[in-house]
Image (cartoon, rainbow, N blue to C red):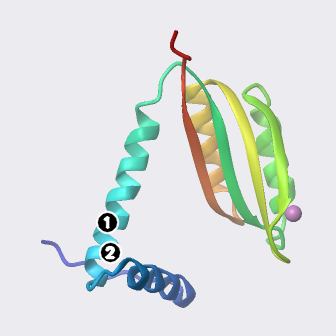
Amino acid sequence: MERISISLPENLLEEFDKILREKGYVSRSEGIRDAIRSYILEHRFISQLSGEVAGTISIIYDHDAPGVLERLTDVQHDFSGVIDSSLHIHLDRHHCLEVIVVRGDSDEIKQLLNRLKATKGVKYAKLTTNVAEVPG
Ligand code: NI
């Protein structure tokens, strides 16, 4: 085992600990190990996608973050070739949920996902897809 030390915003740690209590974890380290495993599995799932895919990218962002709306619009215009449509939901006073329907080349969709994740103000971005070809 390696020992690491990390810095986290207090509210992030509080929420993480709350989840650990709900799930019945007795050790924060075990919770962090499982969270890292999930992160790796998600990365593997996305890495292995190839060819044509269809799915959705959900993002949650803080609409008060300076310039975030403009940056998100720029990114989505850059990838208009793989974006079919999008749906905007005002979650609370500060947060917006956007569901972007994507279809096309998986490499381009992965790039779009990474751009969205890297956009300042975006707190969450997840690609959901298992549709490559419909069997039968
Ligand atoms: Ni909104």
- Residue that carries the numbered disc 1 in the rendered image: 34
Vertical relation: 113 (above or below) 71: above
Side of 123 where 5 appears, left or right: left
Ligand 1 visible in quadrant: bottom right
Amino acid carrying mark 2 in the image: Gly
Vertical relation: 82 (above or below) 24: above
Vertical relation: 93 (above or below) 14: above
Q: Alpha-carbon distance for marks 1 and 2?
A: 5 Å
Image location (x, y in percent) of residue 49? 46, 29
* Classed neighbour count for the residue bearing mark 1: other residues with Cα under 10 Å, few (<14), some (14–19), many (≥20): few
- Residue drawn 82% across the image and 74% down it: 92
Decide which of 107, 30 is in the foreground and name it.
30
CB atoms of marks 1 and 2 within 8 Å: yes
Quadrant location of the N terminus in the rendered image: bottom left
Image-quadrant location for residue 108: top right
Mark 2 residue element: helix
Residue 31, disc:
2
Amino acid carrying mark 1 in the image: Asp
- Residue drawn 69% across the image and 55% down it: 59
Side of 133 where 55 appears, left or right: right
Vertical relation: 98 (above or below) 53: below
Mark 1 residue element: helix
